[in-house]
């Protein structure tokens, strides 16, 4: 698509508005969806084609992302379930977060009240980028944490450092599969899956309480919500950022190349996460 002079001018105006809002901010709320990780090389599971492009074996098997992200597989075929989640865990741990994460950290350090991350991503990229563990709310859980499939009372425990060995032709994991440290039974990732009534949410509830306690202290402060790569298909992050900006009387900056629309007063940038953050940062430097 060709970019007109008016389009370019509008983008630059929005970037300037975003930079000014961040320059004046007392606190940042950082919202992140799957689009945040794409610039680090992580796959985008948008639609079946996006999923199958990332995982060609599942195209041959005729399995969609929604079908694969189902906790029933851990009971019916654990090696198949851990083939998918083990590969993702290996990939996420090996991925270096892109420069946009460091830009957000620098902005956070400039703010008197710091920042808090609210993300639907399970990849642990914010922790790997150096964000404080107690300033992150992972609303769908995290791949670096596990729980017992049988809920034996072990609670939520670190997933361990072992690499899960995967046969990339069949997408099946080799033994030994991750186990519960208390009962020795099968472990599963502490991630909220589709139709998942077994997800243990204690860790996320603690994170959420910390987030809302922090927000409660921001009355009268200048709050900016920077939302990166959060789509409307599962709008958890978008709704949270919109609601937070409205409740706190703050500014919403929405970065999304496909769905940049914002409520009145918001700033919408039809750009990828890394590009938008770098260009806002450049405008801040000016």
Image (cartoon, rainbow, N blue to C red):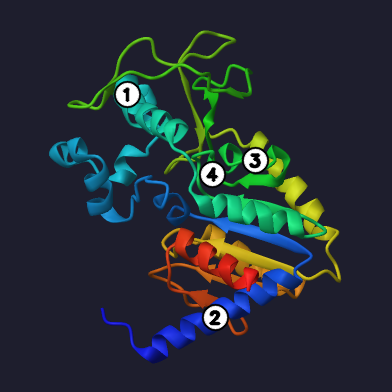
The x, y position of residue 6, in whole percent, is: 41, 91
Query: Circles 2 and 3: CB distance less than 8 Å?
Result: no
Above or below, comparing residue 286 to residue 182 in the picture: below
Q: Which tag, 2 or 3, sits closer to the chain's start?
A: 2
Mark 3 Cα shell of 10 Å, populated few (<14), some (14-19), many (≥20):
some
Q: CA distance from mark 1 to mark 3?
A: 27 Å
Residue tagged 3: 204
172 relative to 201 in the view: left or right: left
The x, y position of residue 185, in whole percent, is: 48, 12
42 relative to 211 in the view: left or right: left
- Provide the secondary structure element on which disc 2 rests: helix
Front in this rendered view, residue 220 or 97: 97
Residue tagged 4: 140
Q: CA distance from mark 1 to mark 2?
A: 51 Å
Q: Nearer the viewer, mark 2 or mark 3?
A: 2
Q: CA distance from mark 2 to mark 3?
A: 34 Å
Q: CA distance from mark 1 to mark 4?
A: 23 Å
Query: Circles 2 and 4: CB distance less than 8 Å?
Result: no
Which mark is on residue 100? none
Which mark is on residue 76? 1
Q: Nearer the viewer, mark 2 or mark 4?
A: 2
Which quadrant is the C terminus positioned in?
Answer: bottom right
């Amino acid at each position: 698509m060709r970019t007109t002079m008016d389009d370019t001018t509008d983008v630059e105006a929005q970037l300037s508005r975003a930079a000014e809002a961040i320059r004046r901010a007392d606190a940042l709320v950082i919202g992140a969806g799957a689009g945040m990780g794409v610039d680090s090389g992580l796959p985008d599971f948008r639609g079946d084609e996006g999923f199958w492009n990332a995982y060609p074996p599942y195209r041959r098997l005729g399995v969609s992302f929604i079908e694969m992200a189902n906790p029933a597989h851990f009971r019916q075929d654990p090696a198949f379930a851990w083939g998918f989640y083990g590969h993702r865990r290996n990939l996420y741990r090996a991925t270096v977060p892109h420069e946009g994460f460091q830009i957000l950290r620098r902005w956070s350090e400039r703010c008197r009240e710091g920042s808090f991350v609210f993300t639907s991503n399970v990849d642990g990229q914010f922790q790997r980028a150096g964000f404080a563990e107690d300033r992150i709310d992972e609303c769908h859980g995290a791949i670096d944490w596990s729980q017992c499939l049988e809920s034996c009372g072990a609670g939520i425990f670190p997933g361990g450092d072992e690499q899960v060995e995967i046969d990339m032709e069949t997408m099946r994991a080799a033994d030994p599969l991750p186990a519960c440290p208390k009962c020795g039974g099968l472990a599963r990732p502490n991630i909220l899956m589709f139709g998942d009534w077994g997800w243990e949410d204690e860790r996320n509830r603690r994170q959420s309480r910390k987030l809302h306690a922090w927000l409660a202290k921001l009355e009268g402060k200048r709050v900016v919500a920077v939302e990166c790569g959060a789509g409307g298909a599962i709008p958890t992050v978008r709704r949270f950022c919109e609601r937070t900006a409205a409740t706190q009387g703050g500014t919403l900056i929405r970065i999304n190349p496909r769905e940049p629309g914002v409520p009145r007063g918001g700033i919408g940038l039809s750009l990828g996460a890394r590009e938008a953050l770098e260009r806002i940062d450049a405008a801040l430097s000016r």
